[in-house]
Image (cartoon, rainbow, N blue to C red):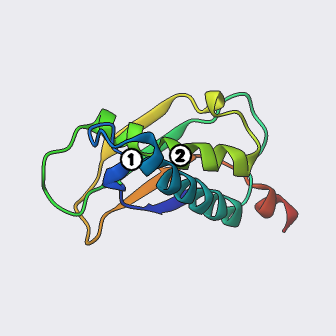
Amino acid sequence: MKIELPWLNPILSPNSRKHWAVKVGPKQKHKEDAWKVAKSVGTPSVRDRYHLTITFHPPTKAHRDLDNCLASIKAEIDGIADAWQVNDKQFRPITIDFGDVVKHGKIIVSLPDSTTTKEAAQ
């Protein structure tokens, strides 16, 4: 089960140091967008833990900190958890890494070896 999300919004980076009022709109939009994408791929089978693998495919070869990338997608992770009706504390372990550079960048969130309710219904 894979979810493809757009590249990071720089406003949501912990390093942006923007006022919370500037961040609230983009956070909500990213959470809603991730919710829609997660809903479209189905809901994983119920379990105690969901091992997420997150691969960041940056748009350029510029240096980035992996931990800041993860912190930048907190809203998306919350949206995915809401769509799947799970508590995000069940997302463990979380494996994060960088992938190849791709035009415009993208983020792939995958749940290895998962059966979805959509697949089960077919």
Residue at the farthest left position: 62
Mark 1 vs 2: CB contact within 8 A: yes
Percent x, y for residue 26? 48, 56
Q: Position of residue 77 (x, y in %)?
A: 55, 44
User: Few, some or many C-alpha atoms within 10 Å of disc 1 (few <14, some 14-19, many ≥20)?
Assistant: many
Amino acid beneath label 1: Leu
Q: Is residue 88 left or right of residue 95?
A: right
Secondary structure category for the residue under label 2: helix
Residue located at (63% from left, 27% from top): 89
Identity of the residue drawn at 25% across and 72% down: 103
Q: Looking at the image, is 6 positioned above or below residue 73? A: below
Q: Is residue 107 above or below residue 88?
A: below
Which residue in the structure is indicated by mark 2? 75
Q: Quadrant of residue 120?
A: bottom right
Residue lying at 73% horizontally and 28% vertically, measured from the top left: 48
* Quarter of the image that includes the N terminus: bottom right
Element at label 1: helix
User: Residue 24 placed where, x, y %?
Assistant: 51, 49
Pointer 1: what residue?
12
Q: Looking at the rendering, in which quadrant would you find the C terminus?
A: bottom right
Amino acid, disc 2: Ala
The span from disc 1 to disc 2 (Cα, nearest Å) is 9 Å
Determine the image quadrant of residue 51: top right
Number of the label disc, if any, that sits on residue 49: none
